[in-house]
Image: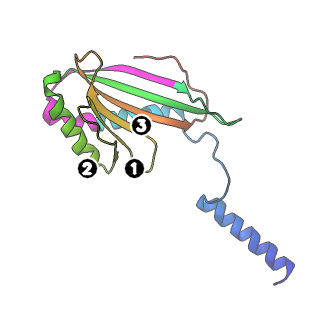
Amino acid sequence: MGKRERTMRTIAVAATLVVTGCGSVLKHGDVSPPSAERKARTLTQQTLDALRPVVGSAGTSVALSKWEQCTTETPGQHRFDYRYVLTLDVPVARSKAVMDAARAHFTEQGYLPDIPVAHSTRVGATEAHSSWWLGVGVSHGNASMFISVDSKCVFTTHDPSTTASS
């Protein structure tokens, strides 16, 4: 094989690696903050829809919508964690049925379940092939329940506002 053929083969292999994502090329900021916020609301709504047979027409309110900068950073890359929490006006006495329905929904969706903890006041799972975590449980103070979604640390296109809102 001549030098020109080796060079062309090297270029073809490098191009294949880049196209298939197997190269060492890093994506800088591939998630826009608004798209992450939309995804969190969508995952929350899908979970709420799955829980409706158990929670009925229980009211909801946004308890938290917050971006936080991740502690480990790479220069030139933006990594942030987005958390979205919806409060469910469901009596805690119905929490077991609600968490059982959430667990069934997570399984149906193919999410990876959290390791079960005895007497836990929440169930959770991670979306398959991503870092997004979802949880359903009893709120602190035991007055109501919640649906929580967490993006974990994602690379964002720009720095989102880190001021909490509801």
Q: Badge 3: few (under 14), some or many (20 or more) residues near its Cα, within 10 Å?
A: some
Residue pictured at 64% horizontal, 42% vertical: 28
What type is the residue that disc 1 sits on? Ala
Q: Position of residue 119 (x, y in %)?
A: 23, 31
Residue matched to label 1: 128
Task: Tell me where residue 18 sits by quadrant.
Answer: bottom right
Horizontal side, residue 123 vs residue 71: left or right:
left
Residue pictured at 26% horizontal, 31% vertical: 120
Label 2: which secondary element: helix
Q: Position of residue 83 (x, y in %)?
A: 43, 28
**Of marks 3 and 1, which one's residue comes earlier in the chain?**
3
Task: Tell me where residue 123 sits by quadrant.
Answer: top left
Residue matched to label 3: 39
Q: Which mark is residue 108?
A: 2
CA–CA distance in space, label 2 to label 1: 12 Å
Q: Is residue 82 magenta?
A: no
Figure quadrant of the N terminus: bottom right
Horizontal side, residue 39 vs residue 19: left or right:
left
Magenta region: which residues?
47-67
Horizontal side, residue 22 vs residue 9: left or right:
left
